Every structure is written in C-alpha cells, then in structure tokens.
Amino acid sequence: MIYWFFYSNLQLFMTEEIRLLKEVLILPKKISIITHRNPDGDAIGSSMALSRYLTKQGHSTKVIFPSEYPVGYGFIEGVSLSVIFDSDPDQARSVIDNSEVIFCLDFNGLDRVDKLGENIQFSKAKKILIDHHLDPEPFTDIEFSDINASSTCELVFKVIEGMGDIAKIDTSIGEALFTGLITDTGSFRYGTRPYTYEVASKLKELGVDDYKLADKIFNSQKEKHLRLLGHCLANRMEVIKDYGVGIMWLTKQDYIDFEIQRGDTEGIVNYMLMIENIKVAAFVLEQPSIIKISLRSKGDISVQEIAQKYFNGGGHKNAAGGGVYANLQDIIDKVKKVMPLYLPKIQS
Ligand code: 5GP
Ligand code: MN
C-alpha cells in the first residue's frame, strides 16, 4: 500500500517532464550526451544506454566524457566511439556547439564537467538533466532529478518507460543500464528502493545476463590493481579507532611506482568500511595536479556535507568527494581534525 503510494508519486513527478521531452524529440535531432569527469559505471552505463536508445529512434547522438573512462568498462557497447575532452578538446567542444539537444547525465553542476561547462552554459540547445545528486543547479530546461533513485541508470530506465518504449530496450541497452544499478548500489547493498529491484527484474526479463555482467565488471582486474590494493592496505592505511575513521592515502611517488592511471584507484576506499566499527572512510590521493579526496560513510553521517564544507566538493550522503590544491600531509591532518566533529567518541 505504502509502496503503491510512492510508486504512483514517482510516476506523477515525471509526467510533465516526459511530455516536454516528447516535444523535444518529436523530430530527429543532433544530440550530445555528457557526463561527469572520471566517469564511473553509472555515468558510462547511463550515457551509452541513452545514446543507443535515442539512435534507435532516429536521432544522431554522440557521448562525451570530460576525461578518460576506466578500461574495465570497455565491454559496454559503443563506449569506444565516445569523444574524450581531455584527448580531443576541439572535437568535444564542436560536438556540443553543433548539438540541438544536450543531455547531462549523472551530475548536478557545471563544475563537474570542467571547461565543457562553458560550452554547455552558452549553448542554445535544449538541455535535459537526468541525475540523482542532491540540489541540481538550474542550468537545464527539463529536469529528471530524483535523489531517491539508486542511480542515473535507474532514472534513464524510468524515462524510457515514461516514453512508452520499454520494448525498445535491447540486451545491450539493458546491460549498460544494469551496470549502473550494480555499481552505484555496491551490488544492491545500499541506495536501493523497491523500484530499483523492479528495474533490475525487468532488465533481467529482457535478457540481461546479470551473472555474466557482474563477472565482467568485477573480475577483469589487472595484476597491478591487486598489487596496488595490497600496498594501500598494508602501507597506506591508518585506523582511528576512537572515532571509527579509516584513512588511506597515496603519494605522487606511488602514482609513479604503481603506474596508476585514471580509474585504477576506484573502489579501494570501500575496503576500509569492512573493518568493524568504522563509520567513515577517507581516501586522500596526491594526484599529479590536485589532491583528490574520496569519502564513504555508513548510516546517518553525511560525507556529502563534509566534502562540501571542507574539501570543495559534494556528492551523496554516503559517498562523496572533492578536490583541493594543497599539501598531502596537510589534507591528511585536516581529515583527522574534521572527522571527530561528526563522529561521537567510541567508548572502549
Ligand atoms: P568518488 O569518491 O568515487 O570519486 O566520488 C563519489 C561521489 O562523490 C561521486 O559520485 C560524486 O557525486 C561526488 N564527487 C566526487 N568528487 C567530487 C568533486 O570534486 N566535486 C563534487 N561536487 N562532487 C564530487
Ligand atoms: Mn550515479
């Protein structure tokens, strides 16, 4: 009963947006789809799925990533045809400038797409947001924004469903969408709602082989990834038992020694949450040009608030991040100083 109420609300909140979207897409359009820097499984999956769906409708589409995608997601159909701003800025800008419609997926503010933000901001194209982050900035014309959605992939499914096109979801669109469901929920361990499982169920019915997909997502690591994980756990981790905080870091030298590339560190921060009583995990990365911070939490502690207030970032309640120009040790010290403000001292 309660579920029916939420579900019908979910339908309602998108009716007007779907009507507007149908108007925009009534004739074939030149469309670009853009997602956030350091694209993850949800960003890549939602972009590729939407692109394939729109192409099947007769539109001409191009996906743009501000920076390189992790090679492990190379199995998602069409991903190798995307344009990467870092490697080809002129093409990326020209695709956006020539678009009649721009979809912005899995991000809520133009600062998440670097310099492309300017091209989006000044473009005359119709801009459409599909996203599940808190408080989207008002830079688009049509917003499909829902922080209760597990993932942007879940929302892309919802939009396709709203368009009356579930039958157009083939297995490759389905696989791309299922990828975001799996990765943004940590394999259905957090961030889900009843509708998430409905989407998973429908995708499975449509032919997605979720076991094979999980194998592709999780069991394609290179030896160097496991060596790096071992190094982080053995040599770069500190546990502050009094407050239930785990801190990990990587130095510039580590980036050289382990030949770390974009995406290689993804997921490592979560290991700290496996330790009993750890409520917050922080991963501080001394990247070549910036210090990047990844934060994860359990339960009620909002790392989104911490990232926004202290590390120039944002994100979700239990998964957030930021970036600062500073000294590695200063940031590690700052993490140690800030965390106790949010966590009660554990009595031993
Ligand atoms: P990760 O720790 O995996 O890099 O990022 C986790 C989440 O935090 C992302 O999904 C994104 O929502 C958010 N996030 C990460 N880095 C930044 C940042 O620099 N700025 C903002 N606003 N959000 C970020
Ligand atoms: Mn997401």
Image (cartoon, rainbow, N blue to C red):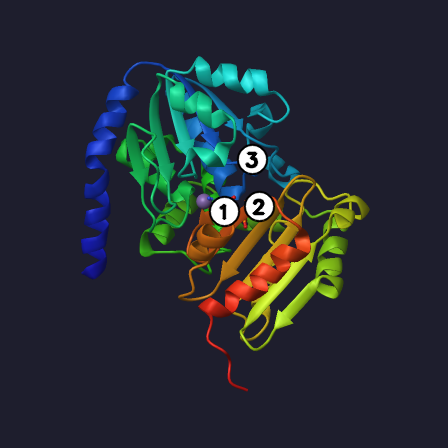
Counting residues from the start of the chain, the first of labels 3 and 1 encountered is 3
Tell whether circle 1 marks a residue whose Cβ is less than 8 angstroms from ligand 1.
yes
**What type is the residue that disc 3 sits on?**
Ile
Position of the N terminus, as image quadrant, is bottom left
- Please say if the residues under marks 2 and 1 sit with CB atoms less than 8 Å apart: yes
- Disc 1 element: loop
* Residue that carries the numbered disc 1 in the rendered image: 312
Residue at position x 47%, y 60% in the image: 189
Distance between mark 2 and mark 3 Cα atoms: 32 Å
Residue at position x 63%, y 54% in the image: 284
Residue in front for this viewpoint, 57 or 341:
341
Tell whether circle 3 marks a residue whose Cβ is less than 8 angstroms from ligand 2.
no
Mark 3 surroundings: few (<14), some (14-19) or many (≥20) residues within 10 A: many
Distance between mark 2 and mark 1 Cα atoms: 7 Å
Counting residues from the start of the chain, the first of labels 2 and 3 encountered is 3
Residue 270 seen from this side: no
Quarter where residue 118 is shown = top left
* Residue that carries the numbered disc 3 in the rendered image: 76
- Say if 53 sits above or below 73 in the image: above
